[in-house]
Amino acid sequence: MKISSSGKKATGSAGARAFRPVCAPECGRLCAPLLAALLASCGAPPPHAAATPPGVSTASPGPVVDFAFDSLDDRPVSSESTRGKVTVLLFLTTGSILSQAEADFLVAMAKNDGDRLNYAAVALETRENRELVELYRKALSIPFPIAMADAQTLAGTGPFHDVSAVPVTVVIDRSGRVVWRMDGRVAKSDELRSAMRGL
């Protein structure tokens, strides 16, 4: 908003026109390389570069992640129990529609994959809500283990850091390193299959 020298808001006159650059036809051949060079110098991707979708992290695998969550049943949800297989780990809350949608996708994938992959979920709920999480698991017919988050994970200081933008879907390789992660968005099966290709 512009402020005039008198201190009042400046208003446009009826005859004011928006600025529109005008180029000669041959200008396009000169402008395009200059624009690309300008964007590159600012660190921006080229105009036609494929952008990573919001919320997706495809960084190089980091160190091995060490975790152990309190499972609702006798099937452990830990780095020890998942090592040796590619693992899809979902962080969810019972009140999130997106979490429910992601859980549905993973239930369908787990049925197709059998024992070839590990699937597990971690409920970002306090221990007082354990019964609610159990009802949630039964209502969605989740076949894979589901666990309660610990205090560090709820505070965002656990091994997976901030997981507050639910759902958070993580792919862990056979050696226990996070190789792909999506925050706050539903990861569809084709995206997950692509992330796990070659692992």
Image (spheres, rainbow, N blue to C red):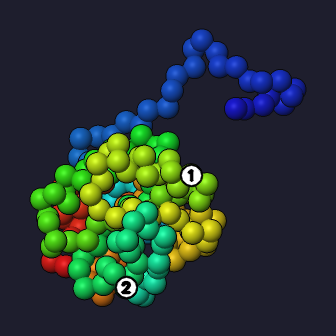
Above or below: residue 43 compared with residue 134: below
Residue in the picture at 50% in, 47% down: 132
- Label 2: state its secondary structure: helix
Which quadrant of the view contains residue 164? bottom right
Query: Circle 2 sits on which residue?
Result: 80
Q: Which residue lies furthest to the right in this view?
A: 6
x%, y% of residue 14? 60, 11
Name the amino acid, label 2: Glu
Say which quadrant the C terminus sits in: bottom left
Query: Circle 1 sits on which residue?
Result: 129
Which quadrant of the view contains residue 83? bottom left
Residue in the picture at 56% in, 52% down: 129
Position of 89 with respect to 69 (left or right) is left
Callout count: 2
x%, y% of residue 28? 26, 48
Observer-nearest of 90 and 36? 90
Task: Tell me which numbered mark, 1 or 2, is placed earlier along the sequence.
Answer: 2
Q: Can residue 147 be seen in this view?
A: yes
Above or below: residue 12 compared with residue 38: above
Instruction: Please tell me how crowded label 1 is: few (under 14), some (14-19), or many (20+) other residues with Cα within 10 Å.
Output: some
Position of 42 with respect to 173 (left or right) is right
Q: Can residue 179 be seen in this view?
A: no
Observer-nearest of 87 and 7? 87
Name the amino acid, label 1: Asn
Query: What is the number of the mark on residue 4?
Result: none
Residue in the picture at 44% in, 68% down: 71
